Image: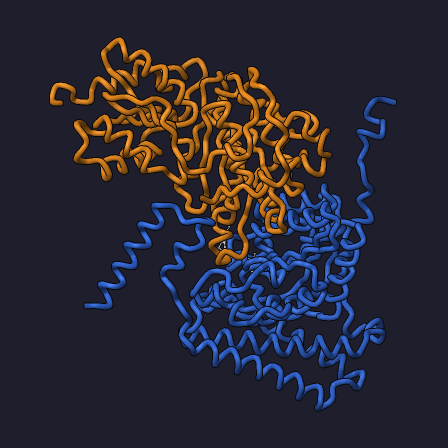
Amino acid sequence: MSAATPGVAARPAPAPAPPKPTTMAQALNQALRDAMAADRSVHVMGEDVGTLGGVFRITDGLAAEFGEDRCTDTPLAEAGILGTAVGMAMYGLRPVVEMQFDAFAYPAFEQLVSHVARMRNRTRGALPLPLTIRIPFGGGIGGVEHHSDSSEAYYLHTPGLHVVTPATVEDAYGLLRAAIASDDPVVFMEPKRLYWSKADWSAQEPAQVPPIGRAVVRRTGRSATLVTYGPSVPVCLEAAEAAKEEGWDLGVVDLRSLVPFDEETVAAAVRATGRAVVVHESSGFGGAGAEIAARITERCFHHLSAPVLRVAGFDIPYPPPMLERHHLPGVDRILDAVGRLQWEEA
Amino acid sequence: MTVLDTPAWRPRTDAAPLMPDPEPFRLLGTPEAARLDPALLGELYGQLVRGRRYNRQATALTRQGRLAVYPSSTGQEACEVAAALALGAQDWLFPSYRDTLAVVARGVDPVEALTLLRGDWHTGYDPRATRVAPLSTPLSTQLPHAVGLAHAARVSGDDVVALAMVGDGGTSEGDFHEALNFAAVWHAPVVFLVQNNGFAISVPLAKQTAAPSLAHKAVGYGMPGRLVDGNDVAAVHQVLTEAVARARAGGGPTLVEAITYRVEAHTNADDATRYRTDDEVAAWQAHDPIALLERELAGRGLLDDALRQRAADEAEALAADLRTRMQEEPRLDPAELFAHVYAEPTQQLREQEAMLRAELEAEQQS
Ligand SMILES: Cc1ncc(C[n+]2csc(CCOP(=O)(O)OP(=O)(O)O)c2C)c(N)n1
């Protein structure tokens, strides 16, 4: 796996503190702090990441602790931020770029597609770009227009990028450490709706940092398997709980990484039930779910008792906040889909 | 007295010292030229002759089908050569697709420099080993890379300057703006060289910008702009050398506009007669970079047969080597398509590689 951990292992880890209630935002902040402490080449950069600590406070305190050369308030220009980060990575640094919001990462798209994703390939491996692009994404926070996009499909369609998204406090820390330590560019998508989700947690030992590219089974089930990621993971777990009333025992797979895509874990979980629903917030047409459903069908056809269904956002521009609840896949819509998995023919 | 009169809200720098002299800087044929070191002039001459020959050879290789395409820098050799020579060994060059000559003048193997245009891979040389970034095709996208690299070197305490090349059309791109802005804010040791060769494919400069000159754009970013006769190799070399020295000394970035002319069509695939007149081309050929330097050398009694012969021999050797090596079929390995996408290929890539391998084996057996 590309997520080698040289940066992570560079310094002996302090003894782990006892677990305490921690938000995903705090875990991400801790991951950045620990990565910067472990490896001088890690530089954080973006809009408002310095003095303010980022609009979501993910970079809180880093400029004070590591100096403004290591946690830099850049000019307000996303292509410039990512473009200069490319140059910094060419020189041997490990930039961690913050895009302020999903929809404001689009100006950087050309740098991402034409350079970030290709530099290793273009140079026959001579110039890998170890950089991390953090993008808060998704809706459900009452954001006005341009603050709630789920843009992962654009990135996962671009060979050369890893695309990762955590759903738990523990993974937020571990996957971000793994992303920063990776020698490949990682688009690290942070479900902003989960920034304030809490768990009892303390920073992992470096050995526990999960490799990028492994899905995790959050819940085993016998009736059907929900395959999901990021902000939809808690929704699916809630749906699985509610499904018990209907007599369904649902499994939930959290992909954690869209690229690389862990086909083995997904296929095994789906084979165990013979039924699958793929759930995500972004629009369904041409979305990650289409790829996942196709791969499940290719790998598990003879184990399937029903077509693979998708529950996704509608194929509409992201709605205004007062209407967004109709767009977001919720428990009912997921259970409706499970109900349509041709049970009578089973 | 209002808050507007307090220093925080006043213009922060004096624009006047940043303004370019509207008269392009020239050396050859001026009294100043007498002070130029004959050894430097001799080297520049050799490089120009070699560069012209390189352009001619590369163009010929397109006709023989040995290069997929070649954007010639014929007529622009002074800029190409001066850019390479203005840099120290530790510095970085950020070229565009038109700048393979600068890459070669910096010492990169010409066959490796032409890999992109031959099409056997994208970048043929090792950027870290040569300190030459990949030739950039998406216009101006290499400029922020140069800024980031220079900035990274500066914060690492290293003495490294980056020189980034771009065309006049490229100055309209957003990345040009963002790169110059970042460079100035970060005080990055970077030099931007705009080769204003009059056209972006067919579109003349008047349709790109209403700025007084491209060099004037520097002022808005808070860096000095300089205009130079891009066919006067001594002048371009001096302006770039000064800008590099200024960057090295902590003086920050400079924008240099070199006025030159693309004597050939945009590429071998372009028909320049559709958008410009022969008279215009002829006027520029009368201001040819090699002829300008020869006149200077001759005036100072430096253009002897030995110098001419040495330059011609070196140029011919380069062309002959290029010709011979480009006749050889390049080594192509389809498996390499999957090798450098990630540090480790994904499972899906391994499966696709196996599929291609099986296809190729079947192809060989049939
Ligand atoms: C982003 C982008 N848009 C369009 C093109 C296609 N294109 C290639 S060269 C060129 C003209 C560039 O002109 P200029 O910047 O003046 O450089 P020159 O070719 O004259 O050296 C265009 C439009 C491109 N390479 N990149």
Q: Is residue A330 visible?
A: yes
Q: Give whichever of B213, B173 is nearer the camera.
A: B173
Residue A222 vertical placement versus B256 (above, below): above
| Lateral position of residue A58 relative to residue B34, left or right | left
Q: Is residue A45 visible?
A: no
Question: Looking at the picture, how far across and down is residue A58, in whole percent?
Answer: 60, 26
Q: Residue furthest top?
A: A245
Chain A tint in image: orange
Q: Give whichever of B185, A302 is nearer the camera.
A: A302
Query: Which chain corresponds to the colour blue?
Result: B
Q: Give whichever of A235, A333 is nearer the camera.
A: A235
| Lateral position of residue A40 relative to residue B25, left or right | left
Asked which quadrant contains residue B11, the reply is top right
Residue, x 62% and y 78% (percent of image)? B50
Residue, x 55% and y 72% (percent of image)? B110
Question: Looking at the picture, how far across and down is residue A150, in whole percent?
Answer: 43, 29
Residue A127 vertical placement versus A257 (above, below): below
